[in-house]
């Protein structure tokens, strides 16, 4: 079963930082990087924020599909089960990052 992540109220979080809570109640902070459209769906690209961030290592990127919760009509983030879609969205993200570096 795919993990569903619900947004936590962001009043106390710095801009661009969100907290997501998974189905098991574990809350993790992420930095919002971008939203990508792929095959008529939207995906959010987040970077995991670690307490032990190391300057030498690049952060771990998480890509989640944005869906509408039928009960609350709010956006939820759902893990992607299809490796091909995950890779295609990641490739699109990398291409976008390369374009920004070229500017």
Image (cartoon, helix red, strand yellow):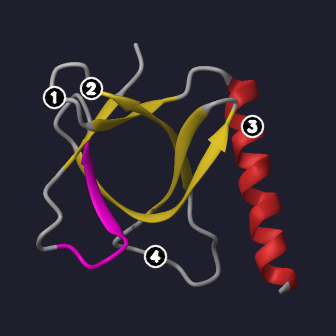
Residue at the spot 63% in from the left edge and 70% down from the top edge: 58
State left or right for residue 8 relative to residue 55.
left
Is 72 rendered above or below residue 34? above
- CB atoms of marks 2 and 1 within 8 Å: yes
Residue position for label 3: 87
In this view, the mark in front (2 or 3): 2
In this view, the mark in front (3 or 4): 3
Q: Earlier in the sequence, mark 1 or mark 4?
A: 4
Q: Secondary structure at mark 2?
A: loop
Residue at the spot 77% in from the left edge and 38% down from the top edge: 88
Is 27 rendered above or below residue 100? above
Residue position for label 4: 53
Residue at the spot 16% in from the left edge and 37% down from the top edge: 25
| Residue range corresponding to the magenta coloring | 13-21
Near mark 4 (Cα within 10 A), the count class, few <14, some 14-19 or many ≥20, is few
Spatial distance from mark 1 to mark 4, Cα to Cα?
A: 35 Å
- CB atoms of marks 2 and 4 within 8 Å: no
Spatial distance from mark 3 to mark 4, Cα to Cα?
A: 25 Å
In this view, the mark in front (1 or 4): 1
Spatial distance from mark 3 to mark 1, Cα to Cα?
A: 30 Å
Q: Secondary structure at mark 1?
A: loop
Spatial distance from mark 2 to mark 4, Cα to Cα?
A: 33 Å
Residue position for label 2: 69
Q: On the image, which quarter does residue 34 sit in? A: bottom right
Furthest residue to the top?
A: 1
In terms of depth relative to the viewer, which is nearer, 56 or 45? 45
Residue position for label 1: 72
């Amino acid at each position: 079963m795919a993990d569903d992540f619900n947004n936590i109220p962001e009043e106390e979080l710095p801009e661009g930082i969100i907290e997501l809570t998974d189905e098991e109640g574990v809350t993790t902070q992420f930095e919002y990087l971008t939203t990508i459209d792929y095959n008529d769906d939207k995906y959010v690209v987040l970077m995991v924020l670690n307490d032990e961030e190391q300057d030498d290592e690049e952060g771990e990127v998480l890509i989640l599909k944005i869906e509408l919760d039928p009960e609350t009509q709010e956006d939820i983030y759902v893990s992607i089960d299809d490796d091909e879609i995950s890779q295609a969205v990641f490739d699109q993200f990398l291409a976008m990052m390369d374009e920004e570096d070229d500017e």
